[in-house]
Image (tube, helix red, strand yellow):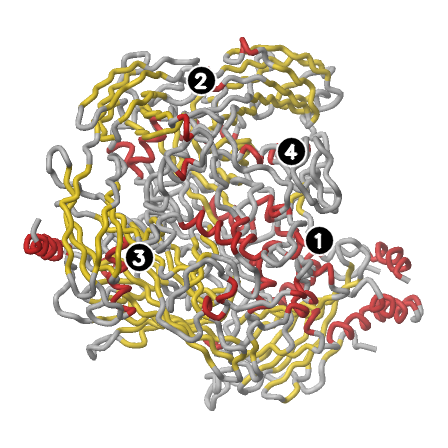
Amino acid sequence: MTGRVVRAFPRLAVATALAISLAGPPAWAHVFPSLHTVVVQVERCEIAVLIGYAAGTGEPTERIIARAASQPKPHALDALRASLTAFALAPLSFTLDGRPLSPSSVHAKIGVDGGGTRPMVVVLATFALPAGGELAIRSRDPRTTRISWQDRSSGRIALERAPAQDHWYTAVASFLLPLVPTPGSLAPGGSACATSGSSPHLDSPPR
Amino acid sequence: MNPRGMRAVAVAALAGLAGCGDPAPHARAQRIGAPEEAIGGPHAIGRIGDFLLENDQIRLVIADTGVDPADPGKTTNGRVNTMFGGTLVDADLRRPGGDGGHGNDQLAELLPGFAFMIINPTRVSVTRDGEDGRPAEVTVVGTPSDLLQQVGLLDTGLLGPSSLQLTQTYRLPPGKRYVEIDTTIKNVSGGARPFPFLDPTQLRDLGFDIPGIDKIQLSVPLGQLPLLGGEQDLFAPGAGFNIRFTIDHSYDQSTGFPAFPGLVIDYLASRGNGVSYGLTMPKSPDNYVHAYAAGYPGQTLTPYSMLLPFTYAGVAGVYMYRPPAQLGPGEQFTYTAYFVIGRGDVASVLDTIYELHGEPTGALGGRVIDQQTSQPVAGANLIVLDAAGRVVDQIATDRNGSFLAHLAPGSYRTLAVTDDRLATAPAGVTIAAGAQVGVGPIEMAPPATLVVSAIDELGRHAPAKIQLLGHVAPADRGKDPRTFLYSLERGERMRPTAFDGTDRYVEGAWWTVDGRVSAAVRPGTYDLIVTRGPEYEITQKTVVLRPGAFTAEQVALVRAFRTDGWIAGDFHIHAQPSTDSGLPIATRVASCAAEGLEVAVATDHNYITDYAPVIAATGLDGWLLGIPGMELTTFEMGHFNGYPLRVDPGSTRGGEFRWTGTPPQGLFDQLRALAIDSGPGTARGIVQVNHPRQAVLGYFAQFFVDQATAEPYTPTGILGIFAPYGDEFQPGSYSTDFDAIEILTGSRLEDVHTFRAPDPLPPGPFPDPQPVPGQIVVGPDGRPSFPGVVETWFTLLDRGHRATAMGVSDSHHLLGDEPGYARTLLYVGAGKDVPGGFTRDDVIDAVRGHRAITTNAPFLELTIGDARIGDTITAPGGNVDVDVHVRSPSWAKVDHLVVYASSQIVADQAIPASQGTDYQTRIHVHLAADSWVVAEATGRGNLFPVVSAVEFPPLDATVLIRALSHGLDLGALPLTSNLRPSSTHIITPYAITNPIWIDVDGNGWTPPRPPLPRRTAAGGPRPDIRARFDALPEISR
């Protein structure tokens, strides 16, 4: 099956240099079958999460390709995107004080790694961020997950207690970001955040 | 002297040496609001916005976080020596007239070390201002971050970087010469945090897959990381001033993990000019060394024992505590250290340490005088040995020759040591608690006085180097010079030997601005050596110097050859602004002129320096042109010179820049933006890649640049484990947007060419693939294990990147690290190579035009017809006659010439011994396609005494790796393998030209190989991730 992947992907003509740099393995990652790279951007009312997922060279890739290949040819690309997106999101969960957060939008773009042999996806998911005490990003597969975060003038994070920004944290099962209890924008009298609605917008829903 | 007299001496000495602080004890902390509130001094970087902590005795500055609150993406990181702000950056005694920024800070930095992690601060604040009469406090709060990404995986295994809050509180009591430092680790996660964070099996699964990892037990050392500065000589009891080699020796005694290997010390101190520093800890049940005492056989343990596992790149690791086995949710662990400030000697630091430890002491006072004149000997070192003969203290005499210090009760021996006299014989003394003991007067034999006056071939008092060469006794030949020629333990200066089996060593050296010197020296029979760089022969005569006698000599320099149109420059030198160099700028510029250099580019670490004012003040402006510049120094991405740069007088570093987390293009862009001539339509500054193949410190080494492609690759196996992981290190961030590259850096001849296995091979075992004598040593991926700078540069040329090859010294000091070796010869035009005949623009144009020769002595000219080095010519048909002319002084004869065309050897000639100083040849070359031609000349003779040999392995990353390697099999790592280039050797003649490019087909020069891809990775903070996502291309069906 892997051989089919190698033959199939050059036709996609994707030059996702940025995706590769985002989802590219750390220097020691040659030992991992796959990799999740998560960048969390905290904004005033939302968090935006960029997830890079590079499939492994073994069974995961074969399963993803099998699902895509089983679709009618015109839909193969969408099926591949959906499968990769599902794999990318599968081990991750986002909670605020223990309550799950649902994405308000999910967008995905797919490509291949530098060697043209492994499929990969970059997913942009956004979540509304109501007031709370602690934002948690959990991974069921911490061994293959690395997380970084950045604050975009949000005023939402208690920076003195937060992990350093722009730093990769590896082997993290539970990544915690402490929130400011009552940020000005969410306090009575503060400017309200627009809500994105309860249903996420999926331009490529997982199947 | 009777006891009353001794007491009088001691009391007088005490009065003379007493602190000069404000008599009213107080302490206060405040934010610096005006420049005059900062401390000042050779390494002071404190400025408005930082935090001043001071009492009636000492003053300290803690840097702010380095982040601009108005724009978190914009930081001033790079001002401090390590990664972030929030560290202790300035420290000095309070001294009369020392306020208003006129202090004598020599401290580079001090910060907490959690194994190899440090604080990335989020907040620095005054937590007690001291107005209540109690201690004043400044507190730094932050999160863990890697000091070195290369050991980031190990950091993760030991400490786990997330969900920890780190705090460092600097607490200054009134009236004390120490600051108490409390460091706290708090678990802010919802679960328990074990230490180590991972067990070895988990660490292996994470990728730290090193043979033996699952069999070892790890530990987590916690302490402080002091960078005491280039002016300071480190000292520890037992090791004396020989810290570095004693650490090396301690590795051999190590039993391996869980105890980190290293030297066990009772305290760390230093010696400096007018100020000294120290570090100690209180008794604690959490003492790291005691927790793993079995790991330190043969070393002396006390209740205050600390571990010193490495000193590297100016950073010392001082580990004191181990954390509890785990911290529960919300739990924290606090440990304490004391940072002490002394008057310039170890003794004044130790006095305070005794006070902190509450140990009883007695006083030792006295005076050192000249045996012949009875005049006081100022600046002498009284070295104190314990009963076992170990150096335990150093006491400096004041201008009256007096000294006073405190010692723990016991029996000691003392001796007086200076650089220009013979040391006194050790004399016994017994110290009792509470008693005062007066000794002396201690009489030192007088020195000889030598006066030399040298003139050049035109009768001028030109700058020149004057040396005294001694000869060791036949019985000592072949012995380690540290055992008989000088004592590093006692703080004596190193005396370089020829390192070639002969008996020669350098007793003293003086770099003069006018060929004249008057110096006190140890009596003896010497060879007087006068030189002025490679363009002059050695002038030599024997002198007999007798104690107390005056000897005068006049000598004339003899020119070896002329270099019409060419000037000599050193484009990589350091002086006092560099934290690892204590050399005054006046001494630096004199040394450059005396070595025959005509251009000196100031390249201090992360400090823009301009030599011009000092050159003018020392009267050298007729001899030497100074060009302001800087060595932009990252921790593990490499070092890059920029010149000529603007000096910003309002900046404590001469300019503002950032290197932390910045990709190469960001570094290059900053250097060019700082250039004097930056602006629309003008030529911009030169960006030079320094020592590119040096581990950790070299750009090519850190990006794993393949010499066959000149492009980076992602390392695998053990190389990958110790590779930096940040985005800025991804191969896509690599940039070739540099103008020049160091081909020969100082004495690093071993980096010039790709390493081949010697024949016969040294003792194994060796990792696979097995080496073949005479062949290039390769790793499992088939790439050379030690790729050469020249081979990589050749590939760059083949692929069309015209980086100018440079020779530099990277000199930080003087003797043993001489400026100008190597150097770059530049063609500035006929008749212009005279004082005042060329300008800075001529120099920069020559670099940019590749009109340059890298050399440590030979003058190697390459011409094709009228074309010179750096030219591009058209040669229809591809037939060219390459003329090579090499000249050298008789102390640097060449014996081998190689000519290359597009990486291929087209001529390989032995040079007859009779022509080793002047050899000419013409080589006919047929070129089938556009090409370039380079000539290289070498010799096998020893450049000593003009250039010192490398007698001892230089400090480099191997120190750190060795500290980590006990119990692990790192034999597959090139740095620690049994087969690697020797870093100890004599310096032999070497020169290589820049190319002449040859256009064969007449349609413009085309690279012989496909051009390098252009990479334009931008520097600065991460962009909005939504924008990053939007920028991704969509897949085409």
The answer to whether residue B153 of the structure is visible from this angle is yes
CB atoms of marks 2 and 4 within 8 Å: no
B360 vs B979, left or right, is left
Q: Position of residue B182 (x, y in %)?
A: 37, 73
Choose between A198 and B373: the one closer to the eye: B373
Callout 4 secondary element: helix
Q: Secondary structure at mark 1?
A: loop
Q: Quadrant of the C terminus of chain B?
A: bottom right
Q: Amino acid at mark 1?
A: Thr
Query: Residue at label 2?
Result: B565
Q: Which residue is mark 1?
A: B716
Disc 1 + disc 2, Cβ < 8 Å:
no
Total labels drawn: 4
Q: What mark, if any, has residue B415 been given in the picture?
A: none
Chain under numbered label 3: B
Circle 3 sits on which residue?
A: B277
Q: Is residue B116 above or below residue A85?
A: above
Dot placed on the residue nearer the N-terminal end, 1 or 4: 1
From this view, report whether residue B450 is shown above or below residue B970. above
2 or 3: mark nearer the eye: 3
Q: Which residue is mark 4?
A: B791
Q: Say which residue appears at 13% left-offset and 33% top-offset.
A: B372
Answer with mark 3 or mark 1, whichever residue precedes in sequence.
3
What chain does mark 2 sit on?
Answer: B
Q: How far separated are the C-alphas under marks 1 and 2?
A: 49 Å
Q: Disc 2 versus disc 4: distance between alpha carbons? A: 29 Å
Of B308 and A139, nearer the camera is B308
Q: Is residue B464 left or right of residue B2?
A: right
Amino acid carrying mark 4 in the image: Glu
Indicate which disc, 2 or 4, sits on the residue closer to the N terminus: 2
Q: In the image, what residue type sits under mark 2?
A: Gly
